[in-house]
Amino acid sequence: MFNPLSPELARLPILTFNLAKQTYGLLIEDVVEVTAMVEYTPLPETPDPFIGVINRRGAILPLLDLRLIFKQSAAPITSASLFIVAEGGSKQVGLVVDEVHQVEYMDALQLVDAPGSARYLHGMITHRSLLIPIVSLPALLTAFLETMSPEGF
């Protein structure tokens, strides 16, 4: 018999990562890949969260430093730095993070709305005694990519 509240159906696959000492999550449906830093080109006169752009398989990919978006101090970006290639609709962005963990299957019933002031969060979820903010990719794309130029990236 079909049970819509069965444990298998109430699991959210979330890629977990760290910014400083805080664990965050990103819905796996928004993730294309995780990759090591490559040479990037800084862009003049762009807001602080923008690190620059890279050539990813012939397409321009903007890089955002999630530390700066979440009001943390910037960390040096080196060849050991990682970024998550995320996609929403037809737009892709590289999200620079400190450390990537793994995909965790979390209880969707534990997901609660983020506080009203947390505009870049989809919500918060409790998992293994941690409170994990879940990044809202649509909010990031709207705030940082669509406002950069008329044609966007």
Image (cartoon, helix red, strand yellow):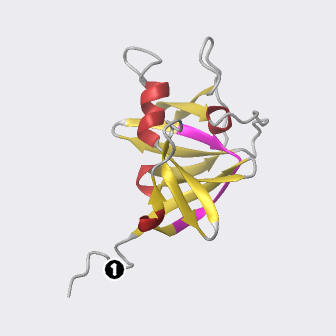
Q: Is residue 101 magenta?
A: yes
Q: Secondary structure at mark 1?
A: loop
Q: Residues within 10 Å of mark 1 (few under 14, many from 20)?
A: few
Residue 123 horizontal/vertical position (percent): 48, 50
Residue 48 horizontal/vertical position (percent): 65, 22
Of residues 13 and 58, the one drawn nearer to the viewer in this rendering: 13
Of residues 126 and 62, the one drawn nearer to the viewer in this rendering: 126
Seen in the picture, residue 27 relative to 92 is either above or below; the reply is: below
- What residue sits 58% from the left and 40% below the top? 95
Residue 57 horizontal/vertical position (percent): 49, 38
- Horizontal side of 97 relative to 119 (left or right) equals right
Of residues 90 and 131, the one drawn nearer to the viewer in this rendering: 131
Q: Is residue 81 magenta?
A: no
| Residue 72 location, quadrant | top right
- What residue sits 75% from the left and 52% below the top? 21
Q: Amino acid at mark 1?
A: Ser
- Is residue 17 in view? yes
Seen in the picture, residue 74 relative to 152 is either above or below; the reply is: below
| Count of numbered labels shown in the rendering | 1
- Horizontal side of 17 relative to 85 (left or right) equals right
Residue 141 horizontal/vertical position (percent): 44, 32
Span colored in magenta: 94-104
Residue identified by numbered label 1? 6
Seen in the picture, residue 12 relative to 51 is either above or below; the reply is: below
- Horizontal side of 138 relative to 128 (left or right) equals left
